[in-house]
Structures are given as C-alpha cells and as structure tokens.
Image: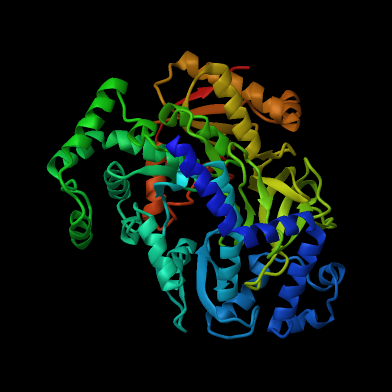
Amino acid sequence: MKDLLINNFLRYGARALFTRTIKKFENDTTNLREAQENALKKIIEKNRDTLYGREFGFQNIRSVEDFQKAVPLNDYSTLEPYIEKMVMGETNILTPDEIIFFGTTSGTTAKPKFIPITDEHFRYVGRSVLPYFRFITEEAPAAIRGGTIKMTSPKLEGFTEKGVPYGSPWYITEVAKNRRNPLIRDIFISLNRNYWEDEIFNITDFNTKYYIIMRLAVERNITHFSMANPSTVLLFAKKLNEFAEDIIRDLYDGQIKKGIFLDPALRIKLMRKIKRNTKRAKELEKLLASDGMLKPSKVFKNLALISCWKGGSAGFYIKQFPRYFDNTPTMEYGIGATEGIFAIPYKLEERGCILQPGYIFFEFIPEEEYFSDRKTILTADQIKEGGRYSIVITGYNGLYRYDMRDIVEVVGFYNRAPVIAFLHKAGNAVSYTGEKIFETHITDAVNLTISDTGIQLNGFTFLPDESGELPRYILMIEPQKELKEETASDFLKAFEKNLKKVNMEYETKRDSMRLGAPALAILKGGEYERFRASLIAKGASDATTKPPVLKKEPSFINNFNVIRRTELKE
C-alpha cells in the first residue's frame, strides 16, 4: 500500500511539474504539420543572415516547399567546409550563435565529425526530453525512487585553436549539471542518492571501470539500469558475476580491490565513502550460493526498469535479459544522436518512439529510393505506417537538410505524430548480385536460428568471403557453450534456411548458384568482449560502441581468434 501511494504521488507530481511541457507536446503531436512548419520558420528566421543563409536565399523562404527547392540535401561532407570555418573560429557561418562545444563522432567514417552545439541547441535538447520524464514516471514510477546504473563517456578531447572544447557528446550532458540554476542543481544532486562521480566514467582500463561501478552499486538502492546498448546491460550482469568474489571480499574488508588500474586520487576520493559492510557481503554470498550466480534482479531487489535501445540488432541481446533480470520491464532509450533528439520513448516493452516535432524540422527519404537519382522527399505528415525511411533533419545547430542515414520504420502513431523504430544505417548492406542483405536480415535470421536450435550466442557478425570460386558469406559466432561439429553444422543449416526466409533475393541468388554456400566461423570464448575493450582503449565511446552485426570487409575476420570453421555441405 505504501509503495502504491508513493508511486501515485510521483505520477501526480510529474503531471503537475510538466504540465506546460506536456501541453505543448500534445499540441505539437496533434497539429503535426503546423508544429513542423513553425519549427522550420523559427530556424530559417534565426539563421537567414548567416553565410549559409545568404548563399541559399533564406530571406526568400516562406514555406516548406520554398525551403526544399532552395536548399539541397546535405551530409557531413557537404557541410564540412562550413564547419571547418567554425572550428577555425569564424562566426555567423551556419548559425549566428556562439559555438559552446563541438561534439565529435566518427559515425560511419573513420574521420571524426565535428557537430556544432550552441546554447539554443542545448536548450532545445533539454526541452525535447522533458516529455520522456513524464512518460517514465507514468510507466515506471518506482524506477525514479532510487539510483541509476548508467554508462556514459564524458570525455573532453581537447580545444580548437580558438579555445572551443570538443569531445564526446556525453561530455556536454555532464557540463549541463553546472549550467543549471545552482539551487536546482543542488536539489537534483541531493535527490539522486546514487550520484556518480564523473571521473569513474573516464577510467581508461576497461575492467577497472566496470569493477568500480559494480563495487559501488551493490551498496546502493539501484532501481534503474539506463544505457544505450543492451549489450552493455548484459556486460554489466556478466561483470557482476566475474567480479563477485572480489566484491564480496571488499565488502567484508571495507576496501576497493588492490592491484587494479585506478588513479590514486580517485581511490582516495571513493574510499572516503566506503566502510565495512558485513551484512551486505553475507547477503551476496547467500544469493551466490542459492542461484550459483549473482542475478542483478536479486542483488538490486528494487530494480524496476531497464532503459536501452530496442531497435536494430538490439532484440538479440534483450532476449537474453531474463537469465539475469527475470521479468524486469524494459523501455526504449530513445532515438537521437550528437546531432539532436529525434524521438522519445513512451511505453514499456515498446520498440517505437514518438517523433518530437516541436524543435527540429524532419524530412524522410523512402528506403527503396535511397540510392535513386530522383528521391521522393516526404514531410512528417506524409509518411505511412509500415514505411521505412531515412531521417533528414534541419536544426538550430546549423545542420540543414542533413541526412542522418538512419533507417527507421513507422510502427504506429501518437495523435498524428509517427511512432518510429530504428532499423539500421542506410547503405550498411552487403550485396554481390543484388541480394542486399541488411543488418535486420542478419539479426532476424540469427534470432530464428537460436529459436530453432536452442544454441545461445554471445555475439555474431556476418561478412563477405571471396576466397572461393563463387562469392559467399561467413557468419562468425561466439557460442556460450562449446559446439560439437555436428551441432555447428545444424546451426549453419538452420541459419541458411532462415536467411532465405527473411531475404527472398538471397534465396533466389543461392538457388541459382550465383552465391556460394555460407560458412560458419566459431570464435574463442570472450572474443567480442576483448574486441569491444580494444575499441574503447583506442578512444571509442563505452556508452555507444555496439558489437558489429554486419561488416563489408572480408578482412574483418582477422581481428578475431577463430578456433574452427564449418562448411555447409550441399
């Protein structure tokens, strides 16, 4: 009864606190076309006298149609000359506002992108996510009653010649705590009893970072796991068990494990809050003895929600959650990037998010026309349920008609706003003879194969192989248990059948012998974790680094220790 009263109080409190925000959100999603036209109008008026605005005649733009005729579709390469001027300190180029930060992201290219962030952009991001807090309070109020285990990479990489900071987009969210009104900031920190020190997330040693987070978490009232990658959620669960004995020993001793790569100053800072906790150590020992493992759902008995990506290949990892988290509810993390917030989650167990139409102007390219010379460009009110589109954005940070290359599917509507789910990056496909195999095909085929065979995997990657007379593909897998040759052969046969089922063109090309039979490469245990750790050690974001589902380069397999190959006998 007490929990019910508290949860209802939180719901009513959120409704009162976010009344204005929700009213605007409901109005924008109901009057979608008007909201989008207003968003575009504000952006154009604000930026009409910039270098870009003058070059493309912003002063003559009066409608969406005018805008689409005057301004070409862009990607980073076409806007890069303007951004380079901004990095060098030139002003009024893409936006008249001062650049307070450049978010760096590699995207699908090796060269880092510099995404400009202004105060106005920063405020828009904050306003965009407020409805999410209302939805999360409505759907899972218990999740905000305690602390959150998160994973961010708030890394400051450096400064431009003009002194503008640049680095991980997560860094600006950490800076946000210091840009709030001091009173609000203090209230926020005092309410968050499990406030995490920023330095923890900048620990460079992979295992040390996870150890410290779990060492501190087991003594805290954790009610929410919130991190973009579902693979990271699983990694936390696995690390909790890998470190179980050391954590229990540290609880008995009131220590942080010696011999790990932890900065002495940070160790001293953390040790000020650590005491012997015999009671908690015995609780974990009991759980370990009874279950043979430490289940996060039992270690954190008040755990109420897991927030993570649910689109694309995420389903493969989410299906493994029950082993560690029992029936803990899940909620989408949202659809966005360094460039902005595009859609917000609103329901438990849903993979779709509501397009946020009040701040960014959105356009959509149908996936089937993506590589066409004559593309149909649709506005948010023109896209249809079941359609698949690449998102194009125009925002306050000077990105005009900027193709994100994110393919989303419309899975429904909220009022009149589309509810979208992420599928994959546009163009991230392999094709020898027109079969066009996307990440979603591989993920669907692997999930079906797991259901058919019962064989569980830690990860998988699909890639081309050109070593034979006919082009073919290899599926790399890291099984959770050792596979006998016969079992591996059964898995490969089932995968071939299921890939044909989800991609008819692949079936046609295989049956006509234009593609050779696929092969299976079995990896040594722990290879995907080792590869992920190596990427992070080179500077990749721990928060957003995803296991590779599909790679175009046949040589990619050389990054892994393959212990055995299995051929499909035809």
The residue that appears at 62% across and 25% down in the rendered structure is: 517
Position in image of residue 97 (x %, y %): 60, 81
* Residue 277 visible in the snapshot: yes
The C terminus is located in which quarter?
A: top right
Position in image of residue 70 (x %, y %): 82, 73
Relative to 494, residue 253 above or below? below
User: Foreground residue, 401 or 502?
Assistant: 401
Residue 432: image quadrant is top right
Relative to 294, residue 340 above or below? below
Looking at the image, what colour scheme do you see?
A: rainbow
User: Foreground residue, 387 or 174?
Assistant: 174
The residue that appears at 22% across and 36% down in the rendered structure is: 280
Outermost residue on the left side: it is 253
Number of numbered callouts drawn:
0
Q: Is residue 166 left or right of residue 136?
A: left
Position in image of residue 425 (x %, y %): 64, 49
Q: Is residue 562 left or right of residue 507?
A: left
The residue that appears at 15% across and 44% down in the rendered structure is: 276
Q: Is residue 499 left or right of residue 178?
A: right
The residue that appears at 54% across and 20% down in the rendered structure is: 491
User: Foreground residue, 219 or 475?
Assistant: 219
